[in-house]
Amino acid sequence: MKIYHKFLLYQNKWIHPYVRVALGVMTTLTYLASILLIVGLVYEHGFTISVAEAHQLQRLYHGVWIVFLSDISLRIALEYKDTRQTFSKLTWILTFLLYLTLVPVVFHRPEVEGAIQAVWDFLNGRIYHLALLLMLSFLNLSYGLVRLLGRRTNPSLILAVSFLIIILIGTGLLMLPRSTVAGISWVDSLFISTSAVCVTGLTSVDVASTFTTTGFVIIILLIQIGGLGVMTLTSFFAMFFMGNTSLYNQLVVRDMVSSNSLNSLLSTLVYILGFTLAIEGAGMLAIWSDIHGTMGMDIHEELAFSAFHSISAFCNAGFSTLPGNLGNPLLMSGHNPFYIYISLLIILGGIGFPILVNFKDIILYHIRRFWRFLRTWEWDGRRFYHLYNLNTRIVLIVTFLLLVVGTAGIALFEWNASFAGMSVADKWTQAFFNASCPRTAGFSSVDLAGLSMQTLLIYLILMWIGGGSQSTAGGIKVNAFAVVVLNLVAVLRGTERVEVFGRELSYDSIRRSNATVVMSFGVLFVFIFIISILEPKLSLLTVTFECVSAISTVGSSLNATPLLGSDSKLLVALLMFVGRVGLITLMLGIIKQKKNTKYQYPSGQIIIN
């Protein structure tokens, strides 16, 4: 018996390396098959194809099906123990559904009509096959992207590259014949794709008349992916559907989504997606309730319009399907609730997901407190002083102040100018809406080129500050702005520590905030300088407004975007990319990081002031 066990041990030791090689080859083939499936579907629905091409695509889909079946079967047969540990319950369900596609292959179609024949037809249906293969392809590619983190690749670089890949894919999709009415140049396609993925809203063409329904679907998908973040989506799919990932992967993803611990990592990802879908769904219903029966659309068009603008608003994108954006005459009279709903969606999307999670904790705390009172009829008089964490307090206070000051300032300077002829309610609604949009949404209800100089300056400062960290908004972020202001106050008061709400701000927070502000000014100066040379006909204010709007991913413009040359459009697109990925994140991905040293130089003083 001992000799037999030794033989099995040596046999396993000899075979195992070959098994790993075989599975590695199958993994590579699966990645390739996933990409080919997506490319095939894009080609099929983006172009008008012939019968011969349709037959070739069907052979491609069949080949992808064989690769997925072979990959899963080999893993179960050769490494069942490891597969059982790494596969989640949902992955096993998808595996079972994939094996059900063998039923029409093994058994002939039943001749007797009934439930069995209907099931056989469903399992043999093209929609079932393609939907299942497409889901497996997305999950497989997501898991592969997250696995890259386990190779100690720079997470910042992966984040930037993932955005770049989505932008390039979007560029190709928007150039498909079925996406546009009469075609589009590659520069404009790249510009629109970058604007959508970076949730900016700047457009070099008239969106309403250029894109078809297919094009709008592509744009809104790019907005949703860009708003949530590529790594957020891929990490969720990889961890929720594909099972366990390495500890290093989880640590990196935790830092990306600002989770408190590894135990709450998956729940944080679920909360992000859950909040997004819930708020966008509620926004869609609210918008539909206001526009229903007033815009000459049928019910399907109204729901599509509501969904598009709800997603665009929450993701702070600023895209609209209407000519003239939200200044369309169909909306400008009698639709104040619509503008308020859009403004609230912009604010919720711009305060940041960590704050939404904090709101959830606060609401649950009060619900449990009230439920305890109903059960015992004894009110818990103890106060919990740290329901609102420091980040939540700072962001909410600064956001409230910016909205109040912005609304009051815009109302003051535009009351008898751009808002002339409106009722008092309309004026205040438009002032609030136009104060919310520079929080990186980019919608417009009035011609920005007709605003006063003072209002444009208010727009510039609101755009530059932007929204909260870990949100769909851009800008330097209200968190960094608040820290810089608090640090300035501490310097003026002569205190060594920066304190607020009974807390001392960390040195790293102050250092990163100051670096963000300095880098923002530096990048803006370089791009404004270059574009002012390339576009001598545009005023300096127009160029500055365009550049601040781009790097802050706002989307507001003084009608200059379509007038830009190809070189300027590419520079503005680059600014949008830099603004969405983040200046600090991009620099961390490019610049080689210096290792921490255990020694310390003597301190020296530099004369300031």
Image (tube, rainbow, N blue to C red):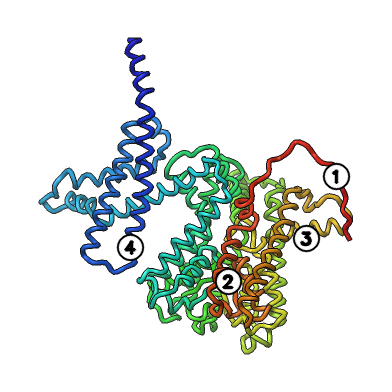
- State the residue in front, 529 or 20: 529
The amino acid sitting under disc 4 is Tyr
Residue under label 2: 555
**First-in-chain label (1 vs 2):** 2
Give the spatial CA distance, label 4 vs label 1: 63 Å
Which residue does the numbered mark 1 point to in the structure image?
603
Mark 3 vs mark 1, foreground winner is: 1
Tell me the element at label 2. loop
Residue placed most toward the observer, 322 or 548: 548
| Real-space Cα separation, disc 2 to disc 4, in angstroms | 31 Å
- Front tag of 4 and 3: 4
**Secondary structure beneath label 4:** helix
* Quadrant hosting residue 398: bottom right
Which of the labelled discs sits on residue 485, or is there none? 3
Quarter of the image for the N terminus: give it.
top left
Whole-number angstrom distance, CA of label 3 to CA of label 2: 26 Å
Say which element carries label 3: helix
Label 1 with label 2: CB-CB less than 8 Å: no
Q: Nearer the viewer, residue 35 or 431?
A: 35
Of badges 3 and 2, nearer the viewer stands 2
Q: Is residue 204 left or right of residue 177?
A: right
Residue 518 x %, y %: 73, 60
